[in-house]
């Protein structure tokens, strides 16, 4: 399992959001570098954003979720074409789980475990 993971719950349906493209970037002042990407599994989870041999470094990161495509495939009109969550890794020895609770017209996130 990578040091940064995520999962998405579609709270409008009560089911995991499967098949969502997620991109992980690290800030390399002033730019951002893509360091991982993947698609959520049937449980809405993405456990392998970072390659097994990738060391987590302290710094600013962001996850971008392709929510527009997810809702379009379900023939649901959503408001957010993408959701971007930026966060800071202070202790690179820890695991960072960043879930997304999603609906067509809102979202929330938190640091999970």
Image (cartoon, rainbow, N blue to C red):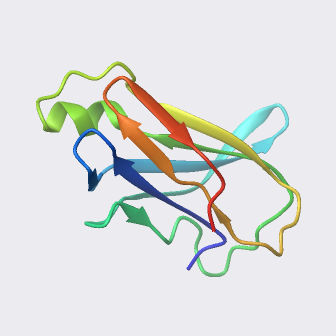
Which part of the image, by quadrant, shows the C terminus? bottom right
Q: Position of residue 82 (x, y in %)?
A: 43, 30
Quarter occupied by residue 55? bottom right
Q: Position of residue 90 (x, y in %)?
A: 88, 58
Work out whether residue 58 or residue 95 is closer to the camera in this orientation and state it.
95
Q: Is residue 64 left or right of residue 73?
A: right
Image point (52%, 53%), residue name: 99
Q: Is residue 66 visible?
A: no
Work out whether residue 37 or residue 102 is closer to the camera in this orientation and state it.
102
Quarter occupied by residue 10? top left
Which part of the image, by quadrant, shows the N terminus? bottom right
Q: Position of residue 35 (x, y in %)?
A: 62, 56
Work out whether residue 84 or residue 10 is closer to the camera in this orientation and state it.
10
Q: Is residue 110 left or right of residue 87?
A: left
Quarter occupied by residue 44? bottom left
Image point (21%, 21%), residue name: 77
Residue 41 lies, with reference to residue 34, above or below; the image says: below
Q: Position of residue 60 (x, y in %)?
A: 79, 46
Query: Which residue is situated farthest in the left direction here?
Result: 75
Q: Is residue 25 visible?
A: yes
Q: Is residue 13 left or right of residue 93?
A: left
Circle count:
0
Image point (53%, 64%), residue name: 49
Image point (33%, 49%), residue name: 20
């Amino acid at each position: 399992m990578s040091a940064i993971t995520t999962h998405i719950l579609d709270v409008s349906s009560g089911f995991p959001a499967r098949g969502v493209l997620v991109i992980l970037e690290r800030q390399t002042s002033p730019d951002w570098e893509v360091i991982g990407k993947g698609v959520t599994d049937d449980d809405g989870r993405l456990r392998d954003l970072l390659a097994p041999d990738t060391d987590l470094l302290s710094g600013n990161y962001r996850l971008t979720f392709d929510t527009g495509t997810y809702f379009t495939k379900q023939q649901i009109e959503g408001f957010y074409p993408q959701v971007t969550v930026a966060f800071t890794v202070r202790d690179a020895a820890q695991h960072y789980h960043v879930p997304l609770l999603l609906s067509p017209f809102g979202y929330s996130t938190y640091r999970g475990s």
